[in-house]
Image (cartoon, rainbow, N blue to C red):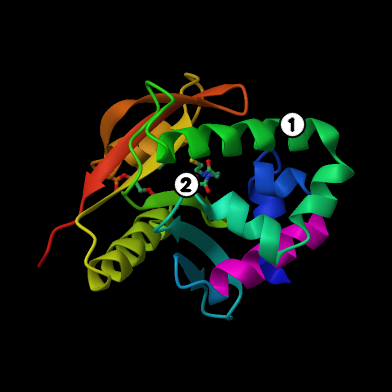
Amino acid sequence: MELARLHRACLPDSVVGLLGERFVRAFYRYVDRSPLEILAVQRDERDRVVAAAVVSLAPETIYRRLLVATPLALALLVRPVVGGRLAWSMFRSAAVLAGGAPGAPEPGIPELILTFVDPREQGRGRGRSLIREVESRLRERGAGAFKVRTESRPGNAARGFYAALGFVPHGASVRFGTRFDVLTRTIDPA
Ligand SMILES: CC(C)(COP(=O)(O)OP(=O)(O)OC[C@H]1O[C@@H](n2cnc3c(N)ncnc32)[C@H](O)[C@@H]1OP(=O)(O)O)[C@@H](O)C(=O)NCCC(=O)NCCS
């Protein structure tokens, strides 16, 4: 699947990408059909996939849902290191839903969980247009804002991208042993 290949090329270190080709394909089949996720895909004039984004309307439960609906459990078993990090994240999410885990970002607001543009197409406004599509689809669902996590490390180029698009800082979180800035963006109702 073209989308899965581009994902692994653009985001080789993402948790989804680390779980292997078979899981990445199952992940995209799942989010495409899921009523709780939005999959936005942009194509070029030759109909090739050049950019994609995934938003979850229920980010706190997505990994548990994937566990039931995809070969996630198998992918985790053969990759115990990634599996351990993911299990910890699911535990944290469960604690947030139960009202625990002080300092964790609040549930209830949609989350942009993946954004990527083909490296050959970066810097041409594809990312901005992708976020516009995401916003328009979230607006249709009645959402007033959404959030994104991006790595806090100074060399992370995505931080400049989100700043240019008007995302504002909304705290930080630690996930999979990495520190992330949490950013939010209000969706204009017009
Ligand atoms: C981050 C990413 C999605 C940006 O997509 P893009 O198509 O290159 O971005 P655009 O061309 O639409 O740029 C939109 C704005 O962001 C700014 N921007 C983009 N990359 C930037 C950077 N590295 N530093 C500062 N600003 C940046 C652009 O200048 C532009 O602002 P302007 O319209 O005011 O000039 C893309 O670089 C990417 O896929 N990176 C690898 C995957 C990744 O890091 N995903 C995010 C994980 S949280």
Q: Position of residue 177 (x, y in %)?
A: 61, 22
For the residues labelled 2 and 1, the Cα–Cα distance comes to 17 Å
Residue 4 in view in this figure: no
| SS at circle 1 | helix
Tag count:
2
**Label 2 belongs to which residue?**
60
User: Percent from the top left, x then y, of residue 24?
Assistant: 72, 59
Q: Quadrant of the C terminus?
A: bottom left
Identify which residue is drawn at 70% across, 70% down.
Answer: 2
Q: Is residue 4 left or right of residue 152?
A: right
Residue 179 x/y as whole percent? 51, 21
The residue range painted magenta reads 20-32
The amino acid pointed to by label 2 is Glu
Asked if residue 99 is among those painted magenta in the image, a careful observer would answer no
Mark carried by residue 84: 1
Q: Is residue 70 visible?
A: yes
